[in-house]
Image (cartoon, rainbow, N blue to C red):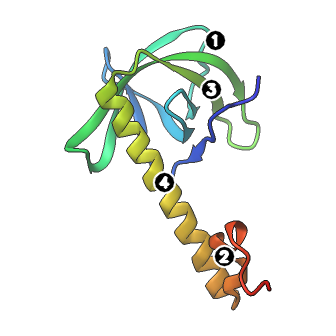
Amino acid sequence: MRHKLIRRRATDELTVYDLNTEQPIGQIENMTVKGMKMVVDKPVKPASIIYCKMDLPGKILGHKEVFFDAECRWCKKNDNTGKYDSGYRLRYVNAKDRAIINELIRRWMIEECKAWNKSAVKNGSLKNGFLSKIFSFGAK
């Protein structure tokens, strides 16, 4: 199954907590408003439902945390890290939390663009920056 939304790599270190136990579940690797990839210490059974809370990196739209239900779709051990990569479908995200997640993802996209452009400047050529991937500079 192909993703219809572009997943954005997390530029912040965000931990997801089990809402019931308040124990950490894992770290967000990438996310859309419909799903996420997390790195977890212990395997998660596919089809299991987790009630999640995620503290935000500062206030976003006036809130410091976001809540959602996540259904594990897959989980496999990463032999390089010894941890488990796992994919989730977000379920029952209310309008407020969906807006917060959208804003968080938008901020990650901006940070990613800044990093691309900083890298291009460091390499001495703005022609390799993010905007050059969208627009044609110097083309006649």
Cα separation between marks 1 and 3: 9 Å
Reading the chain from its start, which is encountered first: label 2 or label 3? Answer: 3
Q: Residue at x 57, y 46 (%)?
A: 8
Q: Position of residue 17 (x, y in %)?
A: 37, 28
The residue under label 2 is 129
Query: Camera-side residue: 73 or 90?
Result: 90
Crowding at mark 2 (Cα within 10 Å: few <14, some 14-19, many 20+):
some
* 84 vs 117: above or below: above
Q: Amino acid at mark 3?
A: Gly
Query: Camera-side residue: 138 or 96?
Result: 138
The residue under label 1 is 46
| Quarter containing the C terminus | bottom right
From the image, state whether disc 4 or disc 1 is nearer to you. 4
Q: Amino acid at mark 1?
A: Pro
Cα separation between marks 4 and 1: 28 Å
- Determine the secondary structure under disc 2: loop
Q: Quadrant of residue 22?
A: top left
Reading the chain from its start, which is encountered first: label 1 or label 3? Answer: 1
- Determine the secondary structure under disc 3: strand
The residue under label 3 is 87
The residue under label 4 is 108
Crowding at mark 4 (Cα within 10 Å: few <14, some 14-19, many 20+):
some
Q: Position of residue 90 (x, y in %)?
A: 50, 21
Side of 128 relative to 86 (left or right)? right
Cα separation between marks 4 and 3: 19 Å
Residue sticking out furthest to the right: 140
- Determine the secondary structure under disc 1: loop
- Determine the secondary structure under disc 4: helix
Q: Amino acid at mark 4?
A: Trp
Q: Amino acid at mark 2?
A: Gly
Cα separation between marks 2 and 1: 40 Å
Q: Residue at x 34, y 38 (%)?
A: 100
